[in-house]
Image (tube, rainbow, N blue to C red):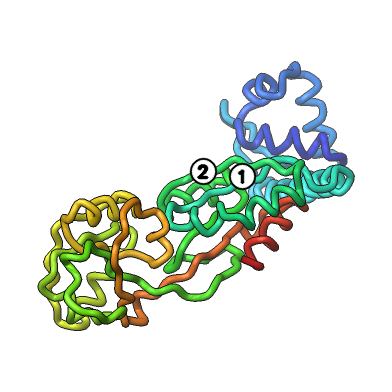
C-alpha cells in the first residue's frame, strides 16, 4: 500500500465510479481498476459494493476512507513543513480583516514588520466578521483579524485587551463636558448603529429598559462614521473605528462592560500555518 493507491481510492470514493475517477485523474480506467484491486487484495477486504452502476463504499470501506484521508493530509502537511523550512520567511499570507481592525494592523509597526521580512507578501480580504469567518472556515484565508463577540469553536486565537464602545458625534450633539456616558444618557438621542453590534447594543438597551431612537443602520463602520459626520445622529461603534473619521468628531466612552470588545487573530485549529504566518501572529501579539 502506498500514497498513490490511497489517493486513487479517495478519488474513486468521491466520484462513485471508476470512469469518473479516471477522468478526474487524467489516467485510463484499467490501471486505476488494477490499483484498487491490489489495494483490496493487500487489505483482504472489499472496499466497494459493485452491485449497481455507482460504486458504494462498504462499511469497512467508509472507515478506511477516513484513515486514508488522514494519512494523505499528514503527508501533505509534512511536505509543506519541509518546503517552508527550506524556503524560510517568504510566500504570501492570506489575511482576512474587518474594517475596524484595519487601522490597528496597517500601522507604522506593520511597515516595520515588512522591513524585517521583505520576502513576505500579503493578500488582504476585507469584510464583516461573518464574511471573514466564512472565508477562514472554507480555507480561503489562513488568518482572520476580527472582533469579539465571536464563535471560537474549532479555532485557535490570540486576543488583545478589551476596547470600549463609544458614542461619536458632531459638537452640536454633545450634551455635556464628560468624556463618558451611560446607556441612559442615550435614551432619547438619534442613534446610528453599525450592524455588527446591533444585537449586542439592543440587548444592552433592553436590559436597561430603554427603547432607543434608531435613525440609521449601516453594514460598515466607515459608513456609520460618515452618517455621524453629516449630522444624522450619534454613531455607536468601537473606539478604534474613530481613526477612520474624516472630520473631528467628539466622543464619549460608553460605561457598559457588556459592550466592550476585543480585536482577535483567529485561525483553524487543524490548519497548517507557515513560518511566515506564525511570524505575523507574533507581530499581532506584540501590537
Where residue 165 appears, as percent x and y from the top left, is: 35, 71
Please give the name of the residue rendered at 14% of the width and 78% of the height, measured from the top-left corner.
210
- Residue 146 x/y as whole percent: 49, 59
Q: Is residue 4 left or right of residue 219?
A: right
| In contact (CB < 8 Å): disc 2 and disc 1 | yes
Side (left or right) of 106 relative to 32? left
Q: Quadrant of the N terminus?
A: top right
Question: In which image quadrant can residue 259 be found?
Answer: bottom left
Residue situated in front as seen by the camera: 17 or 44: 17
Crowding near pointer 2: few (<14 within 10 Å), some, many (20+)?
A: some
- Residue beneath label 2, please? 125
Give the percent coordinates (x, y) of residue 220: 33, 50
Query: Could you tell me residue 38's position as x and y percent?
Result: 84, 34
> Which of the pair 217/206 is nearer the observer?
217
Pick the quarter of the image with the C terminus.
Answer: bottom right
Who comes first in sequence, dot 2 or dot 1? 1
Residue 232 tag number: none
Image point (21%, 65%), residue name: 171
Left or right: 187 as drawn, with respect to 130: left
- Identify which residue is drawn at 78% across, 39% down: 6
Residue 213 against residue 55 in the figure, above or below = below
Mark 1 surroundings: few (<14), some (14-19) or many (≥20) residues within 10 A: some
In the rendered image, the vertical position of residue 56 relative to residue 18, given as above or below: below
For disc 1, the marked residue is 94
Determine the residue positioned at 70% across, 53% down: 113
Helix, strand or loop at mark 1: strand
Q: What is the secondary structure assignment of the residue under circle 2? A: strand
Amino acid at each position: 500500500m502506498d500514497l498513490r493507491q490511497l489517493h486513487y481510492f479517495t478519488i474513486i470514493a468521491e466520484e462513485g465510479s471508476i470512469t469518473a475517477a479516471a477522468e478526474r485523474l487524467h489516467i485510463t480506467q484499467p490501471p486505476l481498476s488494477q490499483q484498487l484491486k491490489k489495494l483490496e487484495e493487500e487489505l483482504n477486504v472489499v472496499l466497494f459494493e459493485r452491485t449497481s452502476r455507482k460504486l458504494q463504499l462498504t462499511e469497512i470501506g467508509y472507515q478506511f476512507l477516513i484513515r486514508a484521508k488522514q494519512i494523505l493530509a499528514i503527508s501533505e502537511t509534512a511536505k509543506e513543513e519541509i518546503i517552508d523550512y527550506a524556503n524560510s520567511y517568504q510566500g504570501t499570507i492570506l489575511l482576512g480583516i474587518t474594517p475596524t481592525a484595519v487601522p490597528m494592523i496597517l500601522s507604522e509597526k506593520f511597515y516595520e514588520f515588512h522591513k524585517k521580512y521583505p520576502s513576505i507578501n500579503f493578500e488582504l480580504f476585507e469584510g464583516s466578521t461573518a464574511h471573514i469567518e466564512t472565508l477562514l472556515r472554507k480555507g480561503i484565508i489562513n488568518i482572520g483579524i476580527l472582533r469579539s463577540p465571536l464563535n471560537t469553536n474549532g479555532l485557535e486565537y490570540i486576543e488583545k485587551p478589551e476596547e470600549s464602545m463609544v458614542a461619536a458625534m458632531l459638537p452640536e450633539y454633545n450634551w455635556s463636558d464628560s468624556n463618558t456616558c451611560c446607556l441612559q444618557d442615550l435614551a432619547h438621542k438619534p442613534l446610528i448603529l453599525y450592524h455588527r453590534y446591533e444585537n449586542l447594543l439592543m440587548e444592552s438597551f433592553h436590559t436597561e429598559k430603554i427603547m432607543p431612537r434608531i435613525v440609521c443602520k449601516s453594514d460598515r463602520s466607515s459608513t456609520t462614521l460618515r452618517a455621524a459626520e453629516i449630522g444624522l445622529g450619534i454613531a455607536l461603534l468601537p473606539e478604534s473605528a474613530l481613526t477612520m473619521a474624516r472630520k473631528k468628531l467628539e466622543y464619549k466612552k460608553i460605561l457598559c462592560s457588556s459592550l466592550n470588545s476585543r480585536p482577535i487573530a483567529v485561525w483553524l485549529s487543524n490548519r497548517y500555518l507557515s513560518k511566515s504566518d506564525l511570524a505575523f501572529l507574533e507581530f499581532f501579539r506584540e501590537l
